[in-house]
Image (tube, helix red, strand yellow):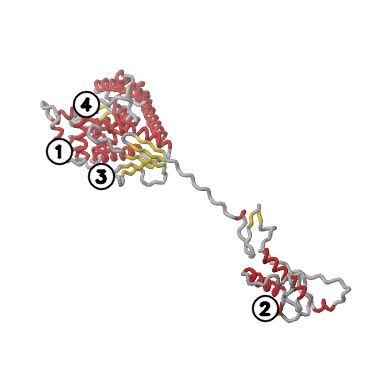
Amino acid sequence: MKKFAAIFFSVLFACGAGAGELISLERKIELARRLADEAARGEAQAGRVITGDFDFARELKRFKLEPPKAAAVEEYSDITAAAPSAAENNAPSNLPPKPRSVAKPKYVVDTSSDFINGHYTGVVGEEKKMPRPAETKKPEPPKAEKKIFSYSSGMFTITSDDYPAHSTMIYLSGEFEKVFRAYFGAAPGGADKKVWLRVSADETSKEKTRVSVGAGGMYSVYAAWSKGLGFGEFCAAAARACIASAAGVDPKKVPAWLAGAFETAFEQSARFGVVSDAAYLASENPPPAPAEIFAAPALSEIGKAQAYWTLVSLEKAFKDKGALSSFLLLAARGAPADKLAEKLLEIKPRSMEFNLWWSCLITGEIWARMGGVLSPERSAAEIARLAVLQKDAPDGSREGVSGSKIWAQRAALSEEISLRIIEIKVALANVNPLYHNALVSLGRMFEAARDGSESAFGESRDAFVSDFKSAQMLGRETKKMMER
């Protein structure tokens, strides 16, 4: 590099000092470049410029660089200045030189507007500019990923994206597992398979619950945790998944009676009052024979209560837990109703007729759970029954007597009135507190009819009607508050 620089400036100096003819700057640079290339290849004559033995015309011809014709203008040392015009050449020498105009360089970068905070915003060599930083749309921040909570127990695996729902599922899964193991746990593998509970706080999901089977054979329950998800609906999905997992069958093929029975069992394990409601429904609608329950294709609310008490009675009938679990697995896998009924004949006492034995068994289980405080709906129904006396009609049927007719017929109904006062006193221990005043007013009305006080009867009757309507209104408001 140093050698090239020495040759370059030596050639320029020599060209300016000893050339017999004018050579343009471009010719000088081209000649210097070629001489430098020749020197770099080792082909140049050493010292030919320094010793003065340098013939420019010969060198130009050797490199086929013809010397230009003689120019009438002087060579200017300022290579950026424009050449003078003819008028300037003929101007007197004593005049000051005319200022030469210098061409304005082409726009490359406008530092007054193309730099913001040290960052270039323009495009080099073009008028078109990129958007300024203030005009650039800011990227949206990435959406925060939902945190997934997980839990595993002996029978359930739970995943959820909502912490309150996750905590609730942990509690419910523990209650469900206790109930299910009490019936299926004694059979080999009956309650050993995991069921996956997937809970999502998805308000837009059309499906509130879904039971499915994964590729690995794991049964799962999906639940959209929202206000639209009913507790009974979730219990029904969980029951169907648990039964299908234990039996290894399609969830859709689980018998209706078994699914309904465990739906009620799961629900009562986590909520008060379910057993009493089921007992009330079954007492008003006594369950039919087991074979009829086993063959039911679908169940109403009454049918679910009847199936639940059938399940409870089976637990009492089978003395061996292993035999009970085997019987339920057989039912879950689709055994015919008549074959299941035949299995029950094998466990009944030999000295008893089957229908009598079974009726005593299931009725005892139902009526043993009739205690406790009644729900508002059941309290209203019970008070409405107590407010009407029954008497024999001329045609032999029974007819009701209520309101002012009780006073008009008090003498003929004296025995019924006395018995009704006793029933009301017993019912006070079980009636819902919302209906306590209404039941007290009803009792006073019957006492006034028994004692023959017409004014007291009228006052008590009006108070009863008012208290009963107020209790109904409060019951509706309470139910709305409970559902929020």
Label 1: few (<14), some (14–19) or many (≥20) C-alpha neighbours in 10 Å: few
- Marks 3/4 in contact by CB < 8 Å: the verdict is no
Real-space Cα separation, disc 3 to disc 4, in angstroms: 35 Å
Q: Position of residue 112 (x, y in %)?
A: 70, 58
Res. 65 mark? 2
Indicate which disc, 3 or 2, sits on the residue closer to the N terminus: 2
Q: Between label 3 and label 2, give the one nearer the viewer.
A: 2
Going by the numbered disc 2, the residue's amino acid type is Leu
In this figure, which residue is indicated by the disc labeled 4?
A: 364
Real-space Cα separation, disc 3 to disc 2, in angstroms: 98 Å
Q: Position of residue 179 (x, y in %)?
A: 29, 31
Q: Nearer the viewer, residue 288 or 86?
A: 86
Going by the numbered disc 1, the residue's amino acid type is Lys
Residue found at the very far top of the displayed protein: 451
In this figure, which residue is indicated by the disc labeled 3?
A: 250
Q: Between label 4 and label 1, give the one nearer the viewer.
A: 1
Occupied quadrant, residue 363: top left
Indicate which disc, 4 or 2, sits on the residue closer to the N terminus: 2
Q: Is residue 138 left or right of residue 401?
A: right
Going by the numbered disc 4, the residue's amino acid type is Gly
Occupied quadrant, residue 324: top left
In this figure, which residue is indicated by the disc labeled 1?
A: 339
Q: Position of residue 357 (x, y in %)?
A: 15, 28
Tag 3 secondary structure:
loop
Indicate which disc, 3 or 4, sits on the residue closer to the N terminus: 3
Tag 2 secondary structure:
loop
Does residue 326 appear in the picture of this structure?
Answer: yes
Q: How many marks?
A: 4
Real-space Cα separation, disc 1 to disc 3, in angstroms: 21 Å
